[in-house]
Image (cartoon, coloured by chain):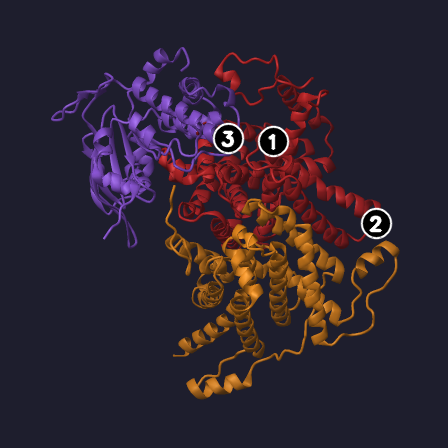
Chain colours: A orange, B purple, C red
Amino acid sequence: MDQLLYASEVLVNGLMTGVMYSLVALGFVLIFKASGVFNYAQGVLALFAALTLVGIQQGQVPFAHLINAITGSHISSFGWTVPSLLAILLTALVMVGLAILIETLVLKHLVGQEPIIMFMATIGLAYFLEGLGDIMWGADVKTLDVGLPQGISETAEAWTAALTGYGFFIDRLDIWATVIAALLVAALVAFSQYTKQGRAMRAVADDHQAALSVGISLRFIWVMVWSIAGFVALVAGIMWGTKSGVQFSLSLIALKALPVLMLGGFTSIPGAIVGGLIIGVGEKLFEFYVGPLVGGATEAWFAYVLALIFLVFRPQGLFGERIIERV
Amino acid sequence: MSPTSPTILSELAPPPAAPAPGTDGYITADGRKIGGVLMDLRHITLRFGGVTAIKDISFDIREGEIRAIIGPNGAGKSSMMNVMSGFYVPQEGEVWFRGAKRPPMRPYQVARQGLARTFQNIALFDGMSVLDNIMTGRLTMMKSSLLEQALWWGRAEAEETRHREQVEKIIDFLEIQNIRKTPVGRLPYGLKKRVELARALAAEPKLLMLDEPMAGMNVEEKEDMSRFILDVNDEFGTTIALIEHDMGVVMDLSDRVVVMDYGRKIGDGTPDEVRNNQEVIDAYLGVAHD
Amino acid sequence: MLYREAGDFKTSYRDDSQTFPLKLDRMGYWVTLAVAFGVIPFVITDYWANAVLVPFLIYAIAALGLNILVGYGGQVSLGTGGFMAVGAYATYKLSTAFPEISLLIHILLAGGITAAVGVFFGLPSLRIKGFYLAVATLAAQFFLVWLFNKVPWFYNYSASGQITAPERTFMGYVISGPATSASAKYLVCLVFAVGLAWVARNLTRGTAGRKWMAIRDMDIAAEIIGVNPLTAKMSAFAVSSFFIGVAGALLFSIYLGAAEASETFGINKSFLVLFMVIIGGLGSIFGSFAGAAFLVVLPVFLKNVLVGALGWPTDLAAHLELMIVGALIVFFLIVEPHGLAQLWRLTKEKLRLWPFPH
């Protein structure tokens, strides 16, 4: 009985981790649907957003390290702090600016290239942004606090204790993250279903040429989608950064989002969410049951192997349609 | 026709086909010998999910003949050819080839039995040169091992040169010597069609299947292609099955014609018989269904 | 006018299908080889060997291997780091278990073992295509690295979890271990690089190469004309992994002398080699060398300029290097998606017409 309760606790925590994966995967799906670009830089976008947020919040001078190296000065901070909400807003603006830059400097010139070339370009972009983030704000691990509640939730513990006789340890941050992610997804779905821009976005996703021919501006849609993806990255960056500090490893959750996408399909928003939850829960449970037998740290590969095995049996993913091949 | 072809081509041609026992061969008006049944399609039915693309179709193809499959758009002609080349496996019915029922097999195994084809939407390998594309037609005959190839030793080099000679004959025959080393992606449409024919011919097939070999061509290109098709049939004795839209071309080229409409067979016979078939006329000219 | 094929007639198909159809190219090739074997070994310094030439040759082998898979076979792989680790650990296990057998043979055997592992992880390619496959190969990357970290047998239960190359000799010369001379390292890698480049060329111009390219360009059509997708894809994975395994073996036993799976063979290695292939040129043997040279020399160059000349802190230089490498990759993809090899081809075409541009 105890074993089962531990396992359920692991399961709940896995769900929370899964929400994070889903968030990053969502950014992937948005960009892939609208532009056919497999955006490897999504994870680095999250890192960059979190770094920028901390930097703005704490009043850091951008490029202080670089300026010091060149001029021999010793500047580091403006000496003020910015309220969280304003800092988030400013960061969101930075992400929009970044989206515009990416569109004009990179994407515009790569229209019509093969997907693999686009993919490689986003890896280049990821390297660039990673270097830029470090140079702008410094590479040290930073703590991020925007006032989200943290720590073990006594309510959840008491509630589960009353229900099962065993109090679950659940981080309040995880609960909040789940709620915010759910709201974000709902907002995105509403946006793409009920607004003019959303419809244009779906039209572009269906057929670039046809969308162009009815007068939809491809470039506008791309900037919009990358901005939204940037915003999603910011949200993911806030959650992950609050949980485990803003550091390079944050960008690695992008790699974890890849198997999520394989499960859910590259173009399916529900797929990204369900896939994220499956992987989050799966890897925690696997580590719980099998990890101790094989030396642990199975989270490093479980998601990929699971996705691989799954795809071998169902190549179209969870929500994809079976493709009839023709010649 | 290049001046040297007849003698060279006779080397490429398979031995003259004797009529299979129990079936009669016949001599066509222009003196070509038609043999026994080469491929026999029996009660083929093909469905995609709920859609029936081909419904209970039977016909045969005899050795040495040019057999056309015609029909309006969406009649199931290309699906039929995909069944013949083993790419689609029909839910019902049997494919008999050279007197034996075809067991379940992958398309590449079907190719090795002596079937080669071209595709409606050209399926060449765009990243490779014309020469390499045509050489791929002979891949099934290559016997050297990976190790021999890696060290360019043993059979690897001899094989390469020997097959290159054969391929060069086809290049001469189809008059594409000057584009030998051009990447296929850069060729105009008509030439691509010709290279695709060359690739299929390189396999020295017993049955050559052409899916709309003249689609999208101008009159001149159509004439060239018709000439090549007739020459291939005439000189190699290759049996040809072809799908074509241009009725004039079909009637001129083929010995017998199958007519399909909405996945059914509505006519089968010589061009003259088909031309006078009421159901065929209705399908082509349209008729009020009640 | 100097560089042209006019007057350079071929009288046999054998001549026509040789590697360098132009006389000038052939001469350039032989001169390069003569310098590489006859001059450089006598003048090479430790710095040049360790910073530039040895890593260049090793990465060129890895890039060749990956190019066979991606550029010729059309199967994208992100598992290169993991496969290099297989080569390294296989060499380590073999050379510590059978010290009396030459290290060079162990390196080839390690390539063979990597080929087998590569085929195993390549099997899903029969069902999974494109990006899905690329992500699936990450399973190989992460699983293999995890395996080499978690199973002590692979590192002979050493306390540090590292593997260390034992000293080995070949015909009296030390070729592995701390006492190896710069020229010995260089020559061993050079022999492997030249030999494997020759093998790659043989494979890609013949039957195997045509099968791979047919699958790459249009897999369905390839199968219908008689290419067995199973053997074509598996042979591409096998050959590619063999090359990558040898590169991993050389990286560990000749170049680094010590390795630790997640440090040395992490996901960044996979990306690095993939960049080399893309920047060099997909489906080009010359490109594999060019891409490797570019990405080996660039950081050395930047470090010399930023840290050496400008006196910046190393971590800052490292970050700037990331930015520059990233930006250059994007720049290259925009300007010439077919890589350095294509630039070289275009230059040659211009040269062919020179000095009459029209």
| Label 1 crowd (10 A; few <14 / some 14-19 / many >=20) | some
Location of mark 3 (residue): B188
Tell me if residue B40 can be seen.
no
| Label 2 crowd (10 A; few <14 / some 14-19 / many >=20) | some
Location of mark 1 (residue): C286
Tell me if residue B142 can be seen.
yes
Q: Quarter holding the N terminus of chain C? A: top right
Q: Are marks 2 and 3 on the same chain?
A: no
- Nearer the observer, disc 3 or disc 1? 3
Distance from the alpha carbon under mark 3 to that under mark 1: 29 Å
Task: Identify the chain of the residue marked 2, using the numbered disc in the image.
Answer: C
Location of mark 2 (residue): C311
Question: Which quadrant would residue B193 be assigned to in this image?
Answer: top left
Distance from the alpha carbon under mark 1 to that under mark 2: 36 Å
Q: Which kind of residue does numbered mark 3 sit on?
A: Pro
Q: Residue furthest front?
A: B288
